[in-house]
Amino acid sequence: MIHLPFADRLEAGKLLAVELSGRKLSDAVVVALARGGVPVGFAVAHRLGLLLDVLVARKPGVLWQRELAMGAIAGTARVSNEGLLADLGVSAEEVEMAIAREQSEMKRRDGLDREGQPAVDFSGKTAILVDDGLATGSTMLASLRHVRNVRAAKAIVAVPVGSRDACDHLRREADDVVCLATPEFFYAVGEWYRDFHQVSDNEVRDLLAESRVRFAKPEATMAN
């Protein structure tokens, strides 16, 4: 029985790891969506003894109203809200301009997060895509399609909490979707956490660095 809200992302990740522990995941890599998914992914990766990687996903906004997302991009994949684009009369040129801007920011963040470390080769592996929650699911869908594009053998979506619509939609494309809670009335991911602070770039880098050390020394244990 999952009791909401979660204390924080680390607690949610530990609970998510318990749910995943019954699956055969020896060839798996935990792929955390930056930035909020990284603490969750860190806990999952450590508890299951798996390598942690990071993926930066972005939501390109309409040029004259950037907070209004026209879809999502992650790595080699993009997802477009075609209905919104048609309703607003957004041109193909405007879409490409918005995507180019976000791709530049995505590349910058990826370089900062990795600190020179190469991306994991997903070819033939199981990618466990982790975020702190799913609202619309657009960034997760783009991330899922990206790991497919780079030849992951299997793609599992794993989140502590999500909207029912988003989880149902992702089940059509993922090999498996693990969601600990799907509240009936879902407005925002943050409402299901007591501590939902904005994850900083420094926190992402620190957790990735610590995960690399822990993966190399599996006898290390996480403080409860």
Image: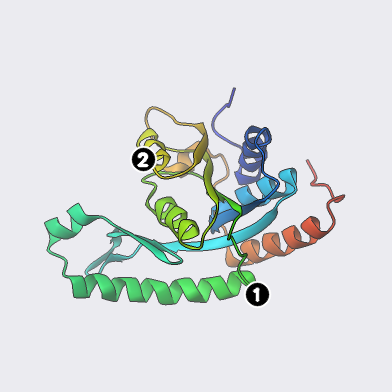
What residue is disc 2 on?
Answer: 169
Residue 21 on image: x %, y %: 68, 36
Give coordinates of residue 116: x percent, y percent: 65, 77
Q: Is residue 199 visible?
A: yes
Type of the residue with mark 2:
His
In the picture, residue 95 is in which quadrant? bottom left
Q: Is residue 198 visible?
A: no
Above or below, comparing residue 27 to residue 69 in the picture: above
Mark 1 or mark 2, whichever is nearer to me: 2
Give the quarter of the figure containing the N terminus.
Answer: top right
Hey, which quadrant is residue 91 in on the image?
bottom left
Q: Residue 10 falls in which quadrant of the image?
A: top right
Kindly identify which numbered label has been placed on residue 115: 1
Q: Earlier in the sequence, mark 1 or mark 2?
A: 1
Task: Please state the horizontal and vertical placement of residue 210, each as a whole percent of the image.
Answer: 75, 60
Q: Which mark is residue 41?
A: none
Q: Secondary structure at mark 2?
A: helix
Q: Position of residue 2 (x, y in %)?
A: 58, 26
